[in-house]
Image (cartoon, rainbow, N blue to C red):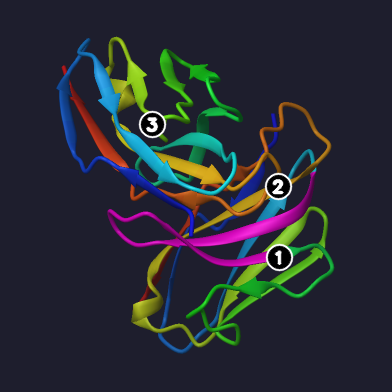
Amino acid sequence: GDSVTQMEGPVTLSEEAFLTINCTYTATGYPSLFWYVQYPGEGLQLLLKATKADDKGSNKGFEATYRKETTSFHLEKGSVQVSDSAVYFCALTPNSGYSTLTFGKGTMLLVSP
Amino acid sequence: GAVVSQHPSWVICKSGTSVKIECRSLDFQATTMFWYRQFPKQSLMLMATSNEGSKATYEQGVEKDKFLINHASLTLSTLTVTSAHPEDSSFYICSASGTGGTGFDGYTFGSGTRLTVV
């Protein structure tokens, strides 16, 4: 079945450091890929998404590129802030329609001043 | 953008009682609602999927008689944890997909409910 693998956390960075959170997936066909962010005690918020190969999703300085050849969707940000501290989830749906999301286990990011 | 309002945000109940969690879509029609459970420092586990006006489809291992899901309208879905026990303590999150509204990105999550059974 479909699956999403994320790097284990926590990822600990100083403010203004470069961030990469790796995400790879296994799926048949052409899934849509998402990154969600969860702040402490809250639900999930969509951060960015990509629906086809080579698409780049971006939002709030975060970017991720849909790489079908490497089945990856790594999250990057050039300069993190303390306010970016949260748990980040990579997820997919099996096709471009809206069906069940498959989540990775989440990666906690801790940014210190 | 699309908003899902989830209530209550936290609840403490006695063992053996029932608790109802509501999720309302405020500016779109939630044709499908997903209910998740999240354990501390873990990912979201899909419990069930419900389509408006239909019975919910439960994931393997989820007790449908314990976790009652109602999705009677396009803007409201409820999860009732019946005869709650301490092992039911968890963070429950709903997610809606549907049509209408503005800025819709496919899935909109509620803010979650922290259930503690004592």
Residue mark closest to the camera, 2 vs 3: 3
Query: Is residue A113 placed above or below A36 in the rendered structure?
Result: above
The C terminus of chain A sits in image quarter: top left
Residue B50: assigned label = 1
> What range is drawn magenta here?
B29-49
- Residue at left 55%, top 49%? A28
- Residue at left 50%, top 54%? B9
Q: Position of residue A44 (x, y in %)?
A: 48, 42
Residue linked to disc 3: A70
Given contact means CB atoms under 8 Å apart, are the residues at marks 2 and 1 in contact?
no
Q: Which amino acid does label 1 sit on?
A: Ser
The residues tagged by marks 2 and 1 sit, at their Cα atoms, a distance apart of 11 Å
Residue linked to disc 2: B97
Q: How crowded is mark 3: few (under 14 residues within 10 Å), some or many (20 or more)?
A: few
First in residue order: circle 2 vs circle 1: 1
Given contact means CB atoms under 8 Å apart, are the residues at marks 2 and 3 in contact?
no
Q: Position of residue B46 (x, y in %)?
A: 51, 63
Query: Is residue B70 placed above or below A24 in the rendered structure?
Result: below
Q: Indicate whether residue B45 is drawn in magenta.
A: yes
- Residue at left 40%, top 84%? B85
Residue mark closest to the camera, 3 vs 1: 3
The residues tagged by marks 2 and 3 sit, at their Cα atoms, a distance apart of 29 Å
Task: For mark 1, name the chain.
Answer: B
The answer to whether tags 2 and 1 share a subunit is yes
